[in-house]
């Protein structure tokens, strides 16, 4: 479940949320905003697969820089994530209150483009994405923390979908970041497409 209060958004413990949007619509910015909001109550673990936290420095959104000590960022490629995601449970037990993953589909698309036309490689990469999403969902439930994944989407014949289509089957919640205007992200929440906006 996703809670919207005024211009802020909160994710419920024990849920996996997919945050998606077309390229350039700042899905990662919403992920950073959620992480900063959560860090007030505990540590946050972020997996960055697309260098987003280098492009959008988290410290530029935090007034109290001591809070940065509560944000742990690791940078993995898709292949690294395959085995590292399994080992993550031990780390998360040490007081982490949120887990976020940036750029899964961007990393996926990069791997696919390197093996263009190889259907077996696409199937293998889809299995990796499923594997990662399965663990993220497991962590959200067993550790009772909110977990989010940000991804870019494609628009094909007026249908909007993640580059790695298997993503759509895993989340408990979905947030579509439609646009960014004048310091606000305009979003649609859930299957009912409840409209909201988040100040960034």
Image (tube, grey):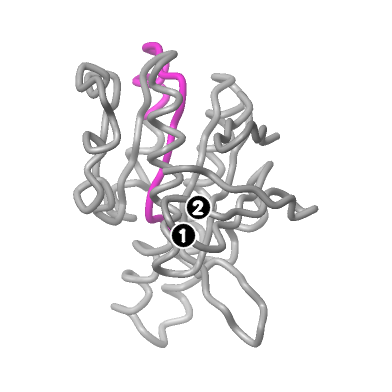
Residue 155 lies, in percent from the top left, at 57, 79
- Which residue is at the far front? 182
| In front of the other: 54 or 170 | 54
Q: Is residue 141 left or right of residue 131?
A: right
Q: Is residue 59 left or right of residue 106?
A: left
Up/down of 111 relative to 150, above or below? below
Distance between the Cα atoms at labels 2 and 1? 5 Å
| In front of the other: 84 or 103 | 103
Residue drawn at 29 percent across, 36 percent down: 61
Up/down of 198 relative to 92, above or below? below
Residue 109 lies, in percent from the top left, at 38, 71
Residue 52 lies, in percent from the top left, at 28, 52
Is residue 98 shown in magenta? yes
Up/down of 1 relative to 191, above or below? above
| In front of the other: 195 or 108 | 195
Secondary structure at numbered mark 1: strand
Which residue matches tag 1? 180
* Residue 71 figure quarter: top left
The stretch of residues the image draws in magenta is: 88-104
| In front of the other: 56 or 17 | 56
Q: Quadrant of the C terminus?
A: top left
Callout 2: 10 Å neighbours few (<14), some, many (20+)? many
Residue drawn at 44 percent across, 27 percent down: 37
Which residue matches tag 2? 185
Asked whether the beta carbons under mark 2 and mark 1 sit within 8 Å of each other, the answer is yes
Residue drawn at 48 percent across, 80 percent down: 119
């Amino acid at each position: 479940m996703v809670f919207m209060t005024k211009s802020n958004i909160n994710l419920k413990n024990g849920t996996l949320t997919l945050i998606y949007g077309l390229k350039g619509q700042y899905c990662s910015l919403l992920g950073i905003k959620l992480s900063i909001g959560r860090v007030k109550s505990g540590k946050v673990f972020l997996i960055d697969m697309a260098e987003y936290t280098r492009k959008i420095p988290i410290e530029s959104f935090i007034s109290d820089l001591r809070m940065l000590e509560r944000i742990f960022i690791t940078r993995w490629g898709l292949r690294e994530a395959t085995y590292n995601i399994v080992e993550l449970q031990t780390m998360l037990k040490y007081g982490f209150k949120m887990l976020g993953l940036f750029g899964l589909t961007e990393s996926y698309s990069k791997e696919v483009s390197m093996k263009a036309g190889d259907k077996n490689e696409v199937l293998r990469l889809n299995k990796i994405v499923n594997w990662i999403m399965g663990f993220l969902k497991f962590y959200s439930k067993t550790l009772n923390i909110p977990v989010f994944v940000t991804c870019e989407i494609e628009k094909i014949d007026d249908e909007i979908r993640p580059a790695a289509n298997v993503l759509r089957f895993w989340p408990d919640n979905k947030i579509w970041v439609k646009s960014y205007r004048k310091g606000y992200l305009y979003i649609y929440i859930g299957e009912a497409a409840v409209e909201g906006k988040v100040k960034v």
